[in-house]
Amino acid sequence: MTMKEPVRIRLQHHVYSSLQGYRTLFCSQAVPEQTRRLLDELAKKCQRVCVGGEVSGFFGIGGGQVCFVRGKPHGVDHVGRARVCIHTVLLAESDLDKVPTFSPFALPQGVFIDPAADLQYVANQLTPVWEPVTEDSISARVAHLP
């Protein structure tokens, strides 16, 4: 019986916030401009809702890409207004096919921005890969079955 290589799923990020005005704080370089505009529009629609609490979603955006969106309050600005952060993680559908037990609820919290993170340095806090298979995960155990 051979051990399979660990699954590594490439992640791309888009982070939109009200830090110093509503704007994109970070977008992975590999994200095409048309996709970035789509994600900006999505974030703008989420911003008002997530002032009152967390919002999240999972959906296809075309071009073989899917995205996970998490929007939530992120502290207050210098005059006490609620600040928000909308973080979208993009994945290739073909990468998700490598995870037979994938569920939209399986993406770990760790791929998203920490709620206490300083948004000025957001690019340093984003992971470029997700490795969903650990030694004791269901995927790892199933891989050894005949």
Image (cartoon, rainbow, N blue to C red):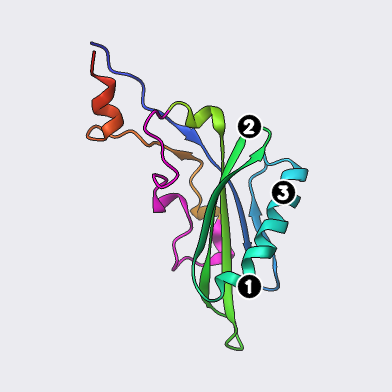
**Mark-to-mark CA distance, 3 and 2:** 15 Å
Q: What span is colored magenta in the figure? A: 99-122
- Residue at the disc numbered 2: 64
* Distance between the alpha carbons at the discs numbered 2 and 1: 29 Å
Residue 25: give x, y in percent of width and height. 65, 60
Would you place residue 101 above or below residue 52 in this image? above
The amino acid marked with disc number 2 is Gly
Of circles 1 and 3, which is in front? 1
Q: Residue at position x 28%, y 17% from top?
A: 3
Q: Is residue 140 visible?
A: yes
Tag 1: residue type? Arg
Q: x, y percentage for residue 129? A: 47, 38
Rendered view: 85 above or below 132: below
Element marked by disc 1: helix
Other residues around mark 1 within 10 Å, as few (<14) / some (14–19) / many (≥20) = some
Q: Which residue is mark 1?
A: 48
Q: Residue at x 56, y 75 (%)?
A: 51
Residue drawn at 63 percent across, 45 percent down: 28
